[in-house]
């Protein structure tokens, strides 16, 4: 029997705005002895333990001390059909797609395979503390059904869609402009807004779509303005050159998407590394969101994302794993590599800004900050419980850590799924057994 209210005790960190560093105390709240009160899957209150307890008589208490509780992590770009592509050797983007990725994605035509992979995919997300994600499925409708069916079973707020791709891909992995429109439309009707699901209209990238297909994607966007849009932009030099060849009339790569009505504040553009001044102007004008994928960009040798340059133009950057070109499901490891990518450019990533980025920051990029990414009352109780001493190396380092920022940086550099002690999805424990089994009536 699951109690309808439960109180989590521990150290709690919550963001109200983006801090630049730990002196930005208006942007975050931290309680050394804190609590989160959950009712029917939503956060009812968060604050000092004593004051939250006074509103919660006879509520079961789960004591997570000395661990750190915060909003669950949000991954804004990941490929569900690449769970068996991660860690494939030796290639840069286009060869990597042709050699490893496309053959693997053909297997997702089979609903039995797709369902089995979905089960593993969600176990991995949850194990690493990711409570919401934005995913590319394969070209097959069956992969989208598997993706959202499993998300519904686990009660996760997830965004995803069928990849649209009608050229430059092997047999078994191409649709047509019309079939991609029809299948996307059917999937939007079936899944968008159902429970915690959102649909993302998903033309894979300029190279794998004809202009006719991008027209169809643009029609879907116009007909479903509350859906997300996701694609890839300017990841790699060969990709950019091939795109210029395929779209000789476009002023640049982003101009292809612009001409087809695909750029809105709900558009997520994976990578966005090698941009021209005109493209940066268009990002700024349209509110489309670049997505920084550091482990992937280093793995494929794609290039260095200019976070400070884009932010300086008022552009809102998201951050993501991009598994299977990304090399970890962990948003902590993503921050680790992100820190290094910025270091190579003389830019800084303070741990306060880093942890804001993978929680509220990504939620803001998705326009979902009123539902996920914070511990504000009325938002959904997706919570991660972090143990900064989970490994010998981290424990030894933590013995010399005095501040919250140092602890966060240890998590950022040394943390992974082992640092994730527990995960709550809409108030239910998802990593280790059920709430009822762990709660003590206090
Ligand atoms: N560009 C088009 N498809 C993909 C993909 O699956 N992964 C990455 N990293 N880039 C892409
Ligand atoms: Zn991608």
Image (cartoon, rainbow, N blue to C red):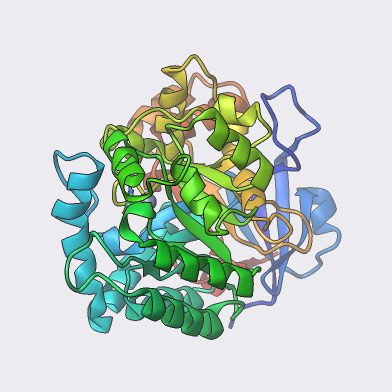
Name the foreground residue: 248 vs 353: 248
Name the foreground residue: 343 vs 185: 185
Residue 337, x across and y down, in percent: 39, 31
Residue 27, x across and y down, in percent: 76, 35
Q: Is residue 197 left or right of residue 249?
A: right
Residue at x 81%, y 32% (from the top left corner): 26
Extreme-top residue of the structure:
346
Question: Residue 327, located in which quarter of the rendered image?
Answer: top left
Residue 397 shows in the view? yes
Q: Is residue 24 left or right of residue 288?
A: right
The quadrant in which the C terminus is found is bottom right
Q: How many marks?
A: 0
The quadrant in which the N terminus is found is bottom right
Residue at x 81%, y 67% (from the top left corner): 57
Residue 107, x across and y down, in percent: 20, 72
Extreme-front residue of the structure:
249
Name the foreground residue: 70 vs 334: 334
Residue at x 25%, y 78% (from the top left corner): 109
Q: In the picture shown, does residue 205 fall above or below 14?
A: below
Q: Is residue 5 left or right of residue 387?
A: right
Residue 320, x across and y down, in percent: 46, 46
Question: Residue 238, located in which quarter of the rendered image?
Answer: top left
Residue 431 shows in the view? no
Q: In the picture shown, does residue 303 fall above or below 35?
A: above
Residue at x 50%, y 81% (from the top left corner): 185
């Amino acid at each position: 029997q699951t109690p309808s209210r439960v109180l989590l005790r521990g150290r709690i960190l919550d963001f109200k705005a983006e801090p630049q560093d730990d002196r930005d105390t208006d942007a975050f709240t931290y309680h050394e002895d804190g609590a989160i009160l959950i009712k029917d899957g939503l956060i009812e209150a968060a604050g000092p333990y004593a004051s939250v307890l006074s509103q919660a008589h006879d509520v079961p208490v789960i004591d997570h001390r000395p661990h750190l509780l915060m909003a669950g992590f949000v991954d804004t770009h990941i490929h569900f059909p690449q769970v068996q592509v991660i860690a494939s050797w030796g290639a840069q983007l286009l060869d990597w797609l042709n050699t490893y990725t496309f053959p693997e994605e053909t297997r997702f035509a089979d609903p039995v395979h797709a369902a089995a992979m979905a089960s593993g995919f969600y176990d991995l997300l949850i194990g690493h503390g990711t409570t919401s994600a934005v995913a590319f499925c394969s070209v097959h409708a069956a992969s989208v059904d598997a993706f959202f069916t499993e998300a519904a079973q686990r009660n996760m707020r997830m965004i995803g869609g069928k990849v649209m791709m009608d050229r430059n891909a092997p047999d078994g992995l191409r649709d047509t402009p019309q079939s991609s429109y029809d299948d996307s439309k059917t999937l939007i009707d079936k899944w968008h807004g159902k429970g915690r699901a959102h649909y993302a209209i998903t033309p894979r990238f300029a190279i794998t779509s004809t202009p006719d297909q991008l027209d169809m994607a643009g029609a879907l966007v116009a007909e479903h303005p509350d859906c997300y849009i996701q694609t890839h932009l300017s990841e790699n030099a060969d990709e950019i050159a091939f795109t210029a060849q395929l779209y000789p009339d476009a002023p640049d790569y982003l101009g292809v998407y612009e001409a087809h009505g695909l750029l809105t504040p709900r558009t997520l553009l994976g990578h966005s590394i090698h941009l021209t001044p005109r493209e940066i102007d268009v990002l700024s004008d349209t509110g489309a969101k670049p997505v920084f994928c550091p482990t992937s960009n280093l793995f494929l040798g794609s290039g260095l994302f200019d976070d400070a340059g884009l932010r300086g133009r008022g552009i809102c950057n998201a951050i993501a794993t991009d598994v299977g070109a990304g090399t970890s499901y962990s948003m902590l490891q993503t921050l680790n590599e992100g820190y290094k990518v910025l270091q190579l450019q003389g830019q800084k990533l303070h741990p306060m800004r880093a942890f804001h980025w993978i929680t509220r920051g990504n939620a803001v990029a998705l326009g979902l900050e009123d539902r996920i990414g914070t511990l504000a009352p009325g938002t959904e109780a997706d919570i991660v419980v972090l143990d900064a001493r989970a490994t010998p190396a981290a424990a030894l380092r933590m013995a010399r850590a005095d501040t919250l920022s140092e602890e966060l940086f240890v998590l950022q550099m040394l943390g992974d799924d082992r640092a994730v002690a527990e995960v709550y999805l809409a108030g239910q424990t998802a990593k280790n057994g059920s709430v009822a089994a762990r709660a003590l009536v206090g």
